[in-house]
Image: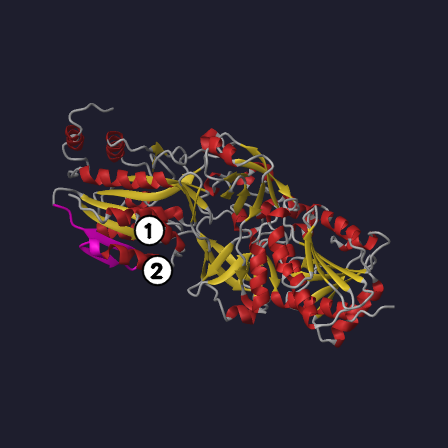
Amino acid sequence: MNECRDLLKKLGSMKAVAGRENMAAEKIADLFREYCDEVKIDRFFNVIGLKKGQSKNPGNVLVTAHYDEIGLIVTGIEDSGFLRFAAVGGVDPKAIAAMEVTVHGKEELFGVIGTKPPHLIPPEDKSKAVKMEDMLIDIGYDGEKARELVSIGDMVSFKNPPQELLNNRVAGKSMDNRSGVATLIEILKELKKLKHDDNVYVVATVQEELGLIGAFCATYNIKADLGIVIDVCHGDMPDAPSDETFPLGKGVAVAVGPILSRKDTKAIIKLAKSENIPYQIDPETADTGTEAAVHSVAREGIPVVLLSIPSKYMHTTVEMVQIDDIISAGRLAARYIAGRVKE
Amino acid sequence: MSALDNLKKLTALDGVSGDEKPVRDYILSQVKDYVDDYWIDNLGNLITYKKGSGNGPRVMLDAHMDEVGMMVTQINSDGLLKFQIVGGIEDRVLVGKRVRIGENKIPGVIGLKPIHLQDSTERTGAVNKKKLTIDIGAKDKEQAEAKVEVGDTVAFAYDPVDFGDNKLMAKALDDRVGCAALIEILKDNYDCDIYGCFTVQEEIGLKGAKTASFQVNPDIAIVLEGTTCYDLPGAEEQSMSTRCGQGPALTIMDRSVIVDSELLKLIEDVAKIKAIPYQYKQTVSGGTNAGRIQVNGTGVKVAVIAVPCRYIHTPVSVMDKSDFENMLKLAKEVLKVIPQVDSSGRFKNHGEPHINLYREEGGKKYV
C-alpha cells in the first residue's frame, strides 16, 4: 500500500503535458524496466513494456493507460513579460485562477496564473466565469527576458504536489491518469507472482487528452488478442449524477457497455467475485471517453475491457484517488491475464 | 537572517483572522530582545514599546498579523466540509487549492465539479462558492469529525517561491511584509518613542488597530501594509492601483482614510533626498488600519507605506523584493527625522525636519 502510494506521488510529480510526453517518457520507461523483459519508446513516445509469457505459442494482451496530462500552451508573450495561453486538453478556466505552474521554456520556469484583485472587480463581473483569454501567466520577468526564455508554443504544466489525505487518498494534478500508470506497475508486480502464458504488453500511452492519439499507434503496432484499458472515472460528489459517479475506496469500476467485450467483462466480474476483489459496475452506453473506443475498432477489433479508478474533481489540480482502488484494479487485471486459457 | 528570509518564514505560518497565535508567538521570539516592554492585549495584539532618546513624538507602527482564510462551518454527512470565507477572497481563486485546517493542520483540498459533468449554465457561470467544499479524504461525517471541528480556521497551504526577476511568491504577503519590516525596524534605535503594534483581525474590519491605538494613544502612526497591485496587460489604466517593482506605495486616500498631508510630505521628502523609489496608490479602493487609528483619541496623524502585491488575497501573491527592501529603508529613514508634534497636532517648527534633511545633504536643493 505504502509502496503504491509513494509510486503514485512520484508519478503525480512528473510533468507530461499532452503532446510533449517526452518530458517524462524515460522516467516511465525506468519504472517498467524493473519488471519487464523489454522496454521501448515508440515514435509518439508511447512507453511499451513487454513481460513475456510462458507459453511456447503465447497470445498477446495489451494493457494501456495514458500518461499525458492536461496543461496549457503559450500563445503570446506580452511586452510586459506576461504570457498568454490556451488549453491543452479539457482545462476548465474556472479551475485555474491563482494556480502555480511550470513553464517549460529554455529552462523550467515558475509562474502563477494572474487574476484581478477582488477589490477591483466590479460587482456585475462577479457572476461571470473568467475566460482563459483574459488570464495571464506571470513568470516575473520583463518582456525582453521572457522572450529570451520562452517561445510561443512552449508547454505549461500545473504545479501541485500530491497531497496525502485520509483513507489512503491522494490529491494532486494528473491523477488522471497517473493512477492508471500506477495500476500498470501494480499489474506487473502481481504478474511476477503469477504464471502467465500470454505476452503482456503494458503501454503508457500519449495524447489521450487530445483525442486518444497514442492508443491508435499502440493498438496498431501490437497485435493484441485482448485489450485492457486503465483510466479514471468520476468519483462521487454531492451535486453530480450518482449513476455517473463512483465512490472512492469501493473498488475498481468495471465498465459494461456495447463497445466492451461482453465475454471478457462477464468473466472479469466473475473473477472479482470469486477472488473477493472489490469492484463496482460502471455502465457505459457509448464510447466511454477512453482508449477502449480505440481498442474496440483497432485492426480486426480487439476485445477490450475497461477498468477505471474513481477520481474526484477530474481535470482540476486536486484530482483525488484512493490507493486501495488502484491495488484492486491491479490485482483483478493481473489475475484475469494469468487465468486466461487458450481456446 | 535577512529580513527577506524572515518574511518567507512568516508567510509559512498560519494566522487567519482571530487565530493569529502562531504568527504572534514567532514575532515575539524575534523582537523581545530589542524592545523595552511588550504586552499582548485582550484582542491578541502584540504591542511592543521601544523608548526613544526623548526628543521625538509617540509613534505607532502598525503591521497586521492576520491573513485571509476560511472557517469550517459544517461537516456534511459525506465527510465533506462546508466553509465560509474569513476576510475577502474571491470565489474563483478557491478552486483547486491546498488548505490546512485547525491546530493540527489537517490537509485538505477544494475541489470542483468536473467540467465533464457541468451543465451549460455551470460551464459559463462563475464559480458558485456555496457549492464548494473542503475535502480531507474522509469517507463520512464521523471520520471527518475525528479530525476537524466546526469553527476551525482554514489557511492556504502554499510555500514561498523565489522566481523571475527578484520576485517572491507567497501566501499572506498581506501583511507579513509589514510584520517582517516592523521586526527589522525594532532592531534599530530612534529618537522617537516607538510602539510597534502587530495587530489582529484587520481583514475582518480593522479590529485590532482600534484597541491597539487606544492603548498606545500615539501622536503619529505609520501603517506598514501589503497593497493591491494590478499592472497586468489589459488592465484599465484607472484600475492600476500600483505597479510591481516601482517602489513602496504611499496611500493618499482609500475607503478608510485620507492620510495626513504633513506626514505624507515628510515621507515624500525623505524618499526624494535618500533616493528611495516610491509610488502612489492610484485607486481609492480598499481600506487599512490607518482608517481606524486616525480617529483614536483626539486624532492621529497617519500614513501608509505599502508593498505592492499582485494577486493579493490569493495563496500565490507576488511581490518584487526591491519594493519590500525600499519600504523598510523608507520607514527607517522617516523614523530618524520624524519631528515632535505640538498641541494642535502639527509638526513643531514646521520646517524643522526639512531643514535638518537639507543640512544633511550639504545644502543641496531638493524638490
User: Of marks 2 and 1, which one's residue comes earlier in the chain?
Assistant: 1
Q: Give the residue at x 27% y 39%.
A: B329
Say if the magenta span includes residue B43: yes
Q: Quadrant of the C terminus of chain B?
A: top left
Q: Chain ID for label 1? A: B
Where residue A44 sits in the image (x, y, percent)?
70, 46
Residue under pointer 2 = B21
Answer with left or right where residue A189 lies relative to residue B215: right
Q: Residue at x 23, y 24 (%)?
A: B366
Q: Secondary structure under badge 2?
A: helix
On the image, the x and y values in percent for residue A190 come to: 68, 69
Is B99 within the magenta?
no
Identify the residue shown where x is 68% and y is 69%: A192
Q: From the viewer's side, name the closer residue of B151 and B30.
A: B30
Q: Which residue is mark 1?
A: B6
Categorize mark 1 by other alpha carbons within 10 Å: few (<14), some (14-19), many (20+).
some
Q: Is residue B286 visible?
A: no
In the visual, does B274 lie left or right of B204?
Answer: left
Give B52 or A298, whichever is nearer the viewer. A298
Question: Residue B253 placed where, x, y %?
Answer: 35, 35
Q: Amino acid at mark 1?
A: Asn
- Which residues, given as a range, are shown in magenta? B33-53
Residue A146 horizontal/vertical position (percent): 49, 34
Q: Callout 2, which amino acid?
A: Lys
Q: Chain of mark 2?
A: B
